[in-house]
Image: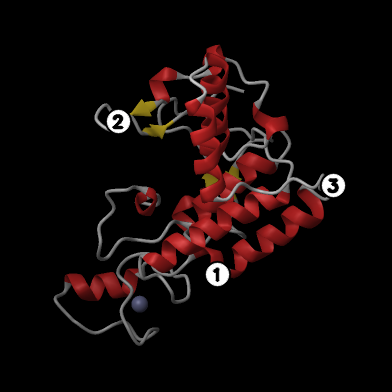
């Protein structure tokens, strides 16, 4: 439920927001030193049920950080995309987890909210980008986790530039150009900088966790072993 808004087939109405706990765990995964166990701490969480080690759904093993992001700007781009996604899906108000008291009233057939809200909160609403804990996490990212980062003048590709790159590469009809285009898509899909992804090799792709839509050819998920 915490990631449903990221899906293309998400519900048009009443789609729950992305969990800020999941989002902060993902930032930890990308930016903490490689091998650091990922844990949701009680003092940082929004949903107390999420407290504890973050485990892999498939292997049940605790997830450890990949440390593949060294640029705070990469995280900033992710948060901008998350913010836009929530705006587009009507989540413009303050972030809130579902309220158990409101849900209890709903189950009793009541239409009013509990005494703590003016409107009842039955599912996760608002943009996690606006959550105070997330903002604090981003500040810590820039001041502590990735404080040593020095920008080298790189700037992100814009969508129209990407289309021009694609047209130029695919029109050459050469294997090398096609390979380069695949590597560009690979880096975009995984939010990687060239220094972070160019050393990846084909045998690091985990096919059991990689999904391609057979009709459209869209890559829905891709997993790379560290
Ligand atoms: Zn309530």
The spot of residue 102 in percent (x, y) is 30, 75
* Some atom of ligand 1 lies within 8 Å of the CB belonging to the residue at label 1: no
- Marking on residue 213: 2
| Residue at position x 47%, y 63% in the image | 84
Q: Nearer the viewer, residue 217 or 96?
A: 217
Distance from the alpha carbon under mark 1 to that under mark 3: 27 Å
> Judging from the image, what secondary structure is the residue with disc 3 in?
loop
Displayed quadrant of residue 200: top right
Q: Residues within 10 Å of mark 2 (few under 14, many from 20)?
A: few
Q: Quadrant of ligand 1?
A: bottom left
> Judging from the image, what secondary structure is the residue with disc 2 in?
loop
95 vs 38: above or below: below
Instruction: Kindly tell me whether residue 35 is visible in this rendering.
Output: no
Distance from the alpha carbon under mark 2 to that under mark 3: 39 Å
Q: Which residue is mark 1?
A: 130
206 vs 54: above or below: above
Mark whose residue sits in front, 1 or 2: 2
Q: Which residue is mark 3?
A: 150
Q: Nearer the viewer, residue 225 or 46?
A: 225
Mark whose residue sits in front, 1 or 3: 3
The quarter of the image holding the C terminus is top right
The spot of residue 155 in percent (x, y) is 70, 49
Q: Of label 1 and label 2, which has the lower sequence position?
A: 1
| Residue at position x 34%, y 47% in the image | 7
- Marking on residue 175: none
The spot of residue 78 in percent (x, y) is 57, 52
């Amino acid at each position: 439920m915490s990631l449903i808004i990221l899906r293309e087939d998400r519900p048009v109405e009443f789609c729950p927001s992305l969990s800020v706990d999941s989002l902060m765990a993902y930032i930890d995964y990308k930016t903490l030193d490689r091998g650091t166990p990922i844990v949701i701490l009680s003092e940082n969480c929004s949903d107390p049920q999420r407290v504890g080690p973050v485990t892999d759904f498939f292997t049940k093993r605790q997830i450890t950080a990949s440390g593949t992001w060294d640029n705070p700007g990469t995280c900033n781009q992710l948060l901008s995309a998350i913010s836009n996604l929530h705006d587009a899906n009507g989540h413009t108000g303050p972030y809130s987890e579902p309220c158990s008291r409101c849900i209890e009233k709903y189950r009793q057939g009541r239409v009013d909210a509990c005494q703590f809200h003016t409107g009842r909160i039955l599912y996760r609403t608002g943009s996690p980008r606006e959550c105070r804990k997330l903002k604090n996490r981003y500040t810590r990212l820039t001041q502590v986790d990735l404080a040593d980062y020095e920008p080298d003048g790189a700037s992100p590709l814009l969508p129209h530039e990407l289309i021009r790159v694609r047209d130029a590469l695919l029109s050459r009809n050469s294997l090398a150009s096609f390979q380069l285009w695949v590597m560009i898509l690979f880096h975009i899909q995984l939010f990687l900088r060239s220094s972070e992804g160019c050393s990846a090799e084909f045998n690091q792709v985990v096919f059991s966790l990689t999904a391609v839509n057979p009709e459209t050819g869209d890559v829905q998920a891709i997993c790379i072993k560290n």
